[in-house]
């Protein structure tokens, strides 16, 4: 008597009924899923009649600022300034953009430079990266825990990019 091995249920399904393999979750597919869920909730009326609907948002909430610093922060804000760590973050982002532009410009001329000029350029790039890393470290130390800390540059990895196209 021969016994046949029972086959899994999905082998008896029609091809269009078989489950699709799971796709890995990426930032893009996650955002897409979130957008789909928000759209479905909106269509179901989940966002109707919320408290404060139709009123301006209160964007100056300083609940995350320590109580002893709120008055000082409010004075800075009213005078058109931001806390020192935010001002430093703006500086860093500006410097990162400048460095990116500088690097792109140097990459265009790299192959035309002799070895001495390339070494001089590499030393200049190292100096710029180290200075920017110092600023980033200062920012990360002075910013509150709730702020997103900035990553420092990996100097040797960045230097290896110099001359690549």
Image (spheres, rainbow, N blue to C red):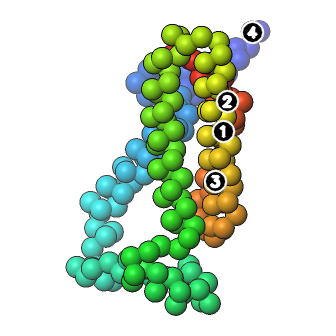
What residue do we see at 33% from left, 56% from top? 40
Q: Are marks 2 and 1 in contact (CB under 8 Å)?
A: yes
Q: State the quadrant of the N terminus.
A: top right
What residue do we see at 59% from left, 86% from top? 69
Disc nearer the start of the sequence (2/4): 4
Mark 2 or mark 4: which is in front?
2
Is 56 displayed left or right of 13 in the figure? left
Which residue is denoted by mark 1 in the rendering?
Answer: 127
Taking depth in this image into account, of 151 and 91 the one nearest to the observer is: 91
What residue do we see at 32% from left, 78% from top? 57
Which residue is denoted by mark 3 in the rendering?
Answer: 136
Mark 3 or mark 1: which is in front?
1
Which residue is denoted by mark 2 in the rendering?
Answer: 123
Between the residue at mark 3 and the residue at mark 2, the CA separation in whole angstroms equals: 20 Å
Taking depth in this image into account, of 98 and 71 the one nearest to the observer is: 98
Which residue is denoted by mark 4 in the rendering?
Answer: 2
Between the residue at mark 2 and the residue at mark 4, the CA separation in whole angstroms equals: 79 Å
| Corner quadrant of residue 122 | top right
């Amino acid at each position: 008597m021969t016994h046949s091995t029972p086959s899994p249920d999905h082998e008896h399904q029609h091809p269009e009924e078989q489950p699709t393999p799971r796709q890995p979750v990426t930032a893009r597919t996650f955002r897409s899923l979130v957008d789909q869920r928000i759209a479905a909730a909106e269509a179901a009326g989940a966002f109707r009649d919320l408290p404060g609907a139709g009123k301006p948002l209160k964007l100056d909430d300083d609940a995350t600022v320590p109580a002893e610093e709120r008055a000082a922060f409010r004075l800075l804000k009213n005078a058109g300034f931001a806390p020192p760590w935010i001002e430093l973050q703006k500086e860093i982002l500006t410097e990162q953009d400048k460095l990116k532009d500088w690097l792109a410009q140097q990459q265009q001329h790299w192959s035309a430079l002799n070895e001495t000029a390339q070494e001089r350029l590499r030393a200049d790039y190292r100096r710029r990266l180290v200075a920017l890393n110092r600023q980033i470290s200062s920012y990360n130390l002075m910013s509150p825990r709730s702020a997103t800390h900035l990553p420092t540059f990996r100097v040797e990895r960045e230097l290896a990019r110099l001359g690549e196209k």
